């Protein structure tokens, strides 16, 4: 079994590569720039916007499965053009390369985002909720999903909509790693944005496991799946958990520079469809994930 992971040097890619390596699969990483910590049997460098190079890589690898993780995934990323080029055009180039190379992949998983739901009017969000993206990142990912539809009759595509997830190795510009870093350093003050938000936080190990199992499930092809915990925690919940684990407390200040316009206030997902497809999902309580991060 040969698995191609785009963005294999990213946060999720590292854990997914590890997941497949434990099963004895041949893991091939596709990265924009080589990284010494990529856990793959082989690594190819290619920019998703370079169609000629991308096609040559796909022709050389001829994967059985493809997991497309490469993306601009930080909501506050400053270069809007780069968000759309990478997330939309880059994905189209990858799908077209798979067709042009006549690769008979058994599954192609595309990671979208639960951000496409925006400020939904329902308490628990399932896949039937109408998209209402509230930022460029979410718009780009929804556009990616529509691009995928153009290839759905020719490629075995599975789309996932992950809610927030975290774990050891996630960059500190993401919310929970920032909080963990402050507690680990025993800082006296932390500056955050909107405090009245609640998120469905999952553990990256669970997400990687779900992606692998979805690719192994023939009935998942052609469908969209939330990946989530099914629970929402406020930022104050997270801060209290970290205080409990570390015995440290600090002052919390709201920095207007961190307050986003069109902030999505509550994101909580349903994984009923996911579990119907792959069975029960490993449950990592958020406090357990935070402890793992704090003690790493």
Image: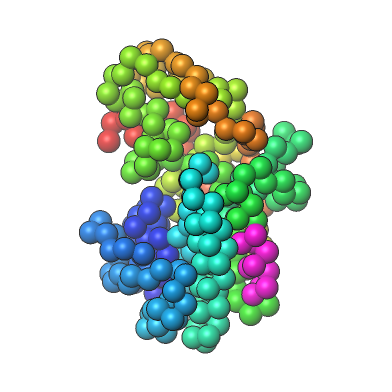
Q: Is residue 55 visible?
A: yes
Left or right: 279 as drawn, with respect to 34: right
Which image quadrant: the C terminus? Answer: top left
Q: Is 25 situated above or below 289?
A: below
Given the current orientation, which residue lies at the most extreme left position? 36
User: At 40% from the left edge and 83% from the top edge, which residue is drawn?
Assistant: 56
Residue range of the region highlighted in magenta in the rendering:
143-152
User: At 25% from the left edge and 56% from the top edge, which residue is drawn?
Assistant: 37
89 and 126: which one is in front? 89
Q: Quadrant of residue 17?
A: bottom left
Q: Is residue 227 visible?
A: no
Q: Which color scheme does this rendered protein use?
A: rainbow
> Does the magenta segment cover residue 42?
no
Q: Position of residue 89 (x, y in %)?
A: 55, 67
User: At 64% from the left edge and 52% from the top edge, which residue is drawn?
Assistant: 139
Image label count: 0
286 and 96: which one is in front? 96
Left or right: 138 as drawn, with respect to 240: right
Left or right: 250 as drawn, with respect to 262: left
Which image quadrant: the N terminus? Answer: bottom left
């Amino acid at each position: 079994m040969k698995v191609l992971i785009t963005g294999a040097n990213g946060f999720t890619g590292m854990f997914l590569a590890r997941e497949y390596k434990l099963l004895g699969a041949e893991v091939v990483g596709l990265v924009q720039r080589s990284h010494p910590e990529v856990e793959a049997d082989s690594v190819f460098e290619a920019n998703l916007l370079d169609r000629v190079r991308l096609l040559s890589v796909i022709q050389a690898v001829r994967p059985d499965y493809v997991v497309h993780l490469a993306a601009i995934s930080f909501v506050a990323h400053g270069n809007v053009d780069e968000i759309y080029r990478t997330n939309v055009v880059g994905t189209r180039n990858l799908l077209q390369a798979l067709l042009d190379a006549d690769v008979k992949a058994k599954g192609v998983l595309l990671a979208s985002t639960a951000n496409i739901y925006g400020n939904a009017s329902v308490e628990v969000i399932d896949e039937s909720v109408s998209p209402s993206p509230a930022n460029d990142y979410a718009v780009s990912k929804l556009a990616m999903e529509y691009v995928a539809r153009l290839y759905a009759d020719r490629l075995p595509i599975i789309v996932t909509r992950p809610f927030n997830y975290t774990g050891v190795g996630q960059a500190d510009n993401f919310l929970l790693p920032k909080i963990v870093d402050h507690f680990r350093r025993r800082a006296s003050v932390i500056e955050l944005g909107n405090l009245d938000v609640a998120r469905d936080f999952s553990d990256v190990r669970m997400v990687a496991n779900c992606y692998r199992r979805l690719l192994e499930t023939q009935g998942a092809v052609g469908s969209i799946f939330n990946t989530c915990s099914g629970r929402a925690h406020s930022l104050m919940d997270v801060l209290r958990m970290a205080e409990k684990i570390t015995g440290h407390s600090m002052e919390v200040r709201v920095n207007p520079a961190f307050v986003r316009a069109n902030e999505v206030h509550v994101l909580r997902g349903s994984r009923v469809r996911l579990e119907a497809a792959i069975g029960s999902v490993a449950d990592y309580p958020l406090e357990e994930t935070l402890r793992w991060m704090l003690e790493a």
